Amino acid sequence: MRLLIVESKQDPGQRYWLLTNALQLSAEEVARAYRQRWDMEVFFRFLKQELHLSHLVSLNQNGIQVMLYMTLIVAMLLLIYKHANAIGYKTAKRRFAMEVRNLAIAIIVAACGGTWTNSSKHKKVVGISSDHSC
């Protein structure tokens, strides 16, 4: 093990103590690795807090990549929705979730042969006959 004391470029005088077992890496390489690790921590905090990614559905590499890509696509769509509607992030997140939910319900109801009516006062399904299996 070795102890490295690294000084911040952004805040001269601010020092960080790093303990590592990567003896073959230079101090600069170790500092860069720690900085990248922190960026990843911030990214995963965003996924957990803002997009409610609480756990990984799959533990293999492909499953994790698919889940991360889908989460990033949703994040991008949410930011586009926020910008297009000129609203705040929390409002955009709530409205976007409601619109996606209503769209999914409408697609399912239409596939079952019904008609989806969505108003602010009531939500109802009209005209599903019993001969459709869903």
Image (cartoon, rainbow, N blue to C red):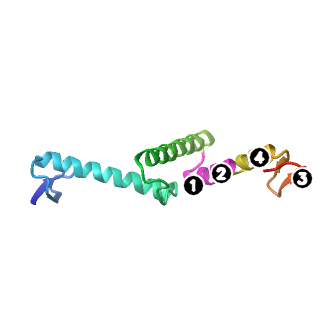
What numbered label is drawn on residue 121? none
Is 57 placed left or right of 33 in the picture?
right
What numbered label is drawn on residue 95? 2
- Which residue in the structure is indicated by mark 1? 90
Q: Quadrant of the N terminus?
A: bottom left
Q: Which residues are magenta?
A: 87-100
- Taking the spot 23% from the left edge, 52% from the top edge, the residue there is 34
Q: Nearer the viewer, mark 1 or mark 4?
A: 4
Is mark 3 in CB contact (under 8 Å) with mark 2? no
Residue type pointed to by label 2: Arg
Label 2 vs 1, first from the N-terminus? 1
Residue type pointed to by label 4: Ala
- Disc 2 to disc 1, how far (Cα)? 9 Å
Label 3 vs 1, first from the N-terminus? 1
Label 2 vs 4, first from the N-terminus? 2
- Taking the spot 52% from the left edge, 44% from the top edge, the residue there is 70
Label 1 vs 4, first from the N-terminus? 1
- Which residue in the structure is indicated by mark 3? 130
- Which residue in the structure is indicated by mark 4? 106
